[in-house]
Image: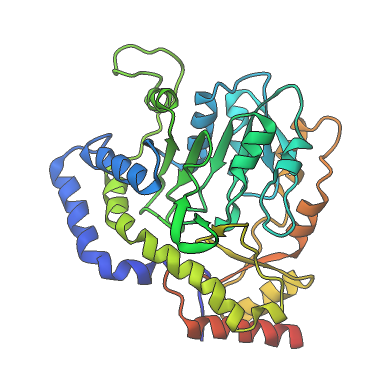
Amino acid sequence: MAVPLFDTATALAPLRGELHDALLRTADGGAFILGPEVGAFEQEFAGWLGARHAVGVANGTEAITIALRALGVGPGDEVVVPSFTFWASAEAIPPTGATPVFCDVDPETMCVTAETVKAALTPRTKAVIVVHLFGNVAPVAEIRRETGLPVLEDAAQAAGSTLTADGDPTHPIARPGALGDIATFSFYPSKNLGGFGDGGAITTNDDALAERVRTLRFHGSADKVDYVEIGYNSRLDELQAAVLRVQLPHLNAWAAHRAASHVRYHRAGIDELVQPPVAAPDATPAWHLYVVRSPRADELVAGLQERGIGARAYYRTPVHRQAPMAVFQPDGLADLPVTDELARTHLALPISATITEEQIAEVVGAVGDVLAG
């Protein structure tokens, strides 16, 4: 049985009629930029998240740049960011004029901690980017408390994840995206909440930050007449908002299935073969990627792909070791031993909002076969 790494089609199949109607409604309405669909999605997403504001932008990368600008980050500043993450988490910093400073992560959760962040602080640090990697939940409150710095949550992979009371997923108390000063999301099609193209959002509980984000996303203008600063042409379009509005009511169920799939992988015996992901304390991750660890990671990726099982490494070369980032490390590359070890040993196994127990058993069986061979 072939098992894809991602499967977005199965979850969307029952929604085809609604999606079709939403796209036609938007096309017939004739408003394609910052119209009623974007406005409605912003309200609905903020309400679902538990934030005061959600502002739609063109993609998750520009969301980070705009959010940093809204925080006042600029030339001469430094922003702490993990290196074990997608390139965009750090790539979005230099366009503000600031310098990325790389920190290590926790070996179990693969997210930053207060300790790893503090090790990278300097007098020039203006903000911290916390990545909720693979859907896990980083300790935002602790980092804010112990550093006293603004925290930007990169929640691109964590839509649907929750912090819970006493580990009870039926009693969520907060969601990534409403934990820090400001947060960013990507709606790339493979994400937990994905559009039919690029899209992103910035969320915050701060009225002033939200207003600046709205100004920055539209060329630095609040009224399309007067321009108060150099901004961006970065707007979520109406068609993507319409698609996201259809999917949003299903996100909780999809997230619950992703979380339950972690348990199913355990029952199928994945722990006996590789090191599975570890949820952060009090977190119920809606795993965007199911990333395991093995000293034979590359062998597993090749062997699983030969057997029709979707598997891949994502960050084999961490961000701080990518060539364009050398200019920001004039004294030599950052010493990040956990990041280097995770980069060498990780691989993603299939997970989706609809993956079945039979598919999970197939994946685990194939992992065992490759390791035995």
Query: Is residue 97 positioned above or below 201 on the image?
Result: above
Q: Residue furthest left?
A: 28
Q: How is the image coloured?
A: rainbow
Q: Residue at x 56, y 36 (%)?
A: 152
Query: Is residue 107 positioned above or below 214 on the image?
Result: below
Q: Residue at x 44, y 28 (%)?
A: 206
Query: Is residue 324 positioned above or below 11 on the image?
Result: above
Q: Position of residue 210 (x, y in %)?
A: 41, 28
Please state which of residues 23 and 186 is positioned toward the viewer in this rendering: 186
Q: Residue at x 49, y 86 (%)?
A: 358
Please state which of residues 173 and 33 is positioned toward the viewer in this rendering: 173
Query: Is residue 371 positioned above or below 73 on the image?
Result: below
Q: Residue at x 46, y 59 (%)?
A: 190
Q: Position of residue 90 (x, y in %)?
A: 63, 39
Q: Residue furthest right?
A: 331
Q: Position of residue 141 (x, y in %)?
A: 59, 41
- Residue 373 visible in rendering: no
- Residue 242 visible in rendering: yes
> Picture quarter containing residue 344?
bottom right
In the image, taking residue 268 as reference, residue 230 lies left or right, namely left
> Picture quarter containing residue 323?
top right
Q: Position of residue 119 (x, y in %)?
A: 79, 37
Position of the C terminus, as image quadrant, is bottom right
* Count of numbered marks: 0
Please state which of residues 29 and 69 is positioned toward the viewer in this rendering: 69
